[in-house]
Image (cartoon, rainbow, N blue to C red):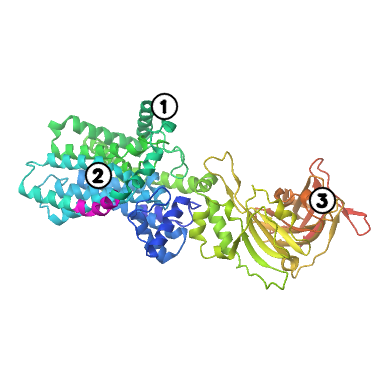
Amino acid sequence: MALGGGLRLWQIGAQPGGFYHDEAFYALDAVSVLQGRLALFFAANNGREPLFIYLLAPMIAVLGRTVLAARGTSALIGIATIPAIYLAGRALFGRRVGLLSAAILAGTFWHLALSRLALRAITLPLILCLAVGLTVQAFAPASGEPAVHPRWRAILAGFVTGLVWYTYTSAQMQLLFVPVMALTLWLSRPMPGRGSDRAVWFGWLLGLALALAPLAFWLTRHADLYLARAGQVSVLSPTINQGDLSGTVFGNIGKALGMFIITGDRIWRHNLSLRPVFDSITGPVFLIGAGACIWWLIAARKIGPPRRAPAVILLAWLLIYLLPTILAEDTPHFLRAVGALPAACILAGVGLEVALAWVSRRGLLMMLAPFRRWIEPPALVAIALLALSGYQTAHDYFDTYVRLPIVGYWLEDQSVSLAQTINDARPGVAQPPSQSQFNMRFLDAASFQSERTALAYLAADRLGDWHSFDQSAPLPPGLTSAQFILDPNRDWSAIRQSLPLSPSVLGLAVPARAQNDLDARPRDAYLVLSVTPLISKTAGAPVPTAGFANGMQLVGWQLEPYAQPTQVHLYWRLPGPVPDDIAVFAHWQAGSGLIAQDDKTPTDNLLPPAGWRANQLIEDTLTVPDDKTSATQIQVGLYRRGDNTRVAVLDDSGAALGDSVIIWRR
């Protein structure tokens, strides 16, 4: 529990980056619950089962509209699944398998990654484990000993089994799994149909009916909505099966079975792309566990009901809950197959127990006998193996997965960045009509449809400070102080032509990049355009002017030498457009030696010098990633990209003073 909890809670609000729009939809639904709008099924975004949303609502009430509140809920659900799978494993195969299954789940990458995203699929393993564990305990204890079956336990088991339908779309597989589990338990009893058994079955069915009654009543009116998402991704669609239904299904079966040890989910949101479910330690014991359960079925007469019935239930659990990914596109898909995850971990637990028992019976662990006074050798080996597996998972997740830019892109990290930009800006206040100056915020809302759900959750309190604005429209007249959030991939020439002239400074920045599933490469997510009076930028600092031979004038700068990264802000003014392909450089020097530099097109070509208007003031920022506190001076200059020749710096009479200007000296 401690290990699994630590892995799931460590920096849960920050890693992985981003906040996918599905997560935002759940969060907004939870907000609506807090506002009194209750529902059995939430219709937006292809429809969503309610359990996760109702668990999420109190966390948002405590922590506010934050990523931490949303993903922290998933982390707690993921942690709760660890004792839940212990319950299921113990009920089926005994205490040792329960412990091993819990340890394997705690260190499995699939469940760890899912526990750190605010997706409703995380509730299915938890409730499914509870349902199986409670139901098996009520009817067939793993020890095979006679047991008293209180009716309340049977009612609770049935009720929790019904709750599975309120978790995730794949829970529809309960229509197959519940009859298989119930029939197996019925046939495994020594004398099925006795009076005590009938009382327990009646209690279980009563609990199941109580849980399902509200949803069943709702389905009489909205069955099409409940089944809509499954129909959209089904292999029955000719668009998906490409006219070869049988070939697609058989191919998907191979991919689904191979995901455990060969090739896993390719989608970066769900997995370290293509990483199989199990690693080199847990993969072999998963195969051993599957083989052992199959053998117990084949040798049913020798083994008897105590092993046969749990094996039937576990294999049925695994195979039935693989159907949602087998019968849909993008196989293997770790969200659709999530119901099979606990069964796979229990199989691995069975395999590890069988393997350790085999080597122990043959005396292969005798070398560990000196440790017996503290811990049994099989347990010591199990701890060592699972610790190595958990370490590999932690390394793959925290040292590799969350650090990959593509993971942030697929989880829509730009939405969090955009919300932060909106929240950090001071509220815009319009001046009285008699005055010509404005301090306003503008958002081209039509350009950010994919981010709108996350913004509605993360920036709801500040969105009202931003005016909706069309990039094809000119700016309001007299605007001397403003901030704009624009789509850099749209034509904003109308704004560019109406940007104010001196003394206002124009600053441009691209705070985030984005790449959706269909993009071949990352793109600029959004553009922040600021219009600020020059005096507010350079207050308290000298503002000498350096004129260059191509007409560009450096009229001011600000230096942040101890910032991380080190930054220098330059303020340019032009008498007119500059036709040359110009680059600006900044050199950090220690004495006469160069220790760092940054070269780039002014404004990163977002507003190329050739498009600058006469007497506009443009802010540009150059950075060096490392701390350069050893620098003694910084010099700035221009050069032509065509021949790499520097542009001369001129004095007031037009005579050349050199090819750079020192803006800072220690």
- Mark 2 vs 1, N-terminal side: 2
Give x and y (percent) for residue 332: 40, 36
Residue kind at label 2, given as amino acid type: Val
> Within 10 Å of the Cα at label 1, are there few (<14), some (14-19), or many (20+) other Cα atoms?
few
Q: Is residue 509 magenta?
A: no
The residue under label 2 is 97
In the image, which is nearer the foreground, mark 2 or mark 1? Answer: 1
Q: Secondary structure at mark 1?
A: loop
The residue under label 1 is 243
Q: What span is colored magenta in the figure?
A: 207-219
Quadrant, the C terminus: bottom right
Q: Which quadrant of the structure image shows residue 62?
A: bottom left
Quadrant, the N terminus: bottom left
The residue under label 3 is 577
Q: Residue at x 52, y 54 (%)?
A: 452
268 w.r.t. 415: above or below: above
